[in-house]
Image: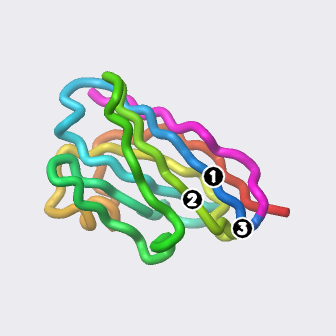
Amino acid sequence: QVQLVESGGDLVQPGGSLRLSCSVSGNNLDAYSIGWFRQGPGKEREGLLCIEAHDGSTYYADSVKGRFSISRDNATNTRTFYLHMNALTPGDTSIYFCAAAAWNPSISFMCIHKTVAYWGRGTQVTVSS
């Protein structure tokens, strides 16, 4: 069982930056790939960035390449993954979720098809002046 808790969502002005956190706890955490997803008003949930558990390979959706990045902090027993967001636009307004998956054919498959085993509850990001 894996638990994920997102935090850091806020109201930010266009062009601003924000860092979201995903705190991951549970058993056998090294086996899980982690992804960041979002769902805007009236839109389907979209995979943004996913990082593979074993080799650290990363998939970035075209919509966030060059603006968003993912990092991790393994310093404690509870693993924390961060989503760094820059050059935010009103189109980035969404609920942001992190998720964990034990296996996928590829890290891109996980992100594109949202094939995950565990979801967090999400954190709201609003980009507005």
Residue at 57%, 66% (x, y): give it: 43
- Asked whether disc 3 touches disc 2, contact meaning CB atoms under 8 Å apart, the reply is no
Up the image or down, 98 lies above or below 25; here it is below
Q: Which residue is mark 1?
A: 18
Q: Reply yes or no: does residue 5 show up in magenta.
A: yes
Is the magenta region chiefly helix, strand or loop?
strand
> The residue tagged with tag 1: helix, strand or loop?
strand
Q: Tell me residue 25's x, y (percent).
A: 34, 26
**Looking at the rendering, in which quadrant would you find the C terminus?**
bottom right
Nearer-the-camera pick, 79 or 114: 79
Amino acid type of the residue that numbered disc 2 sits on in the rendered structure: Met
Residue at 33%, 62% (x, y): give it: 111
Q: Which residue is mark 3?
A: 15
* Residue 12 found in image quarter: bottom right
Of the two numbered discs 2 and 1 on the same chain, state the one appearing first in sequence: 1
Cα separation between marks 3 and 1: 10 Å
Q: Is residue 109 left or right of residue 49?
A: left
Q: Which residues are magenta?
A: 1-13
- Asked whether disc 2 touches disc 1, contact meaning CB atoms under 8 Å apart, the reply is yes
Task: Give the label on residue 85, or none.
Answer: 2
| Label 3 Cα neighbours within 10 Å, binned few <14 / some 14-19 / many ≥20 | few
Q: Tell me residue 124's x, y (percent).
A: 65, 47
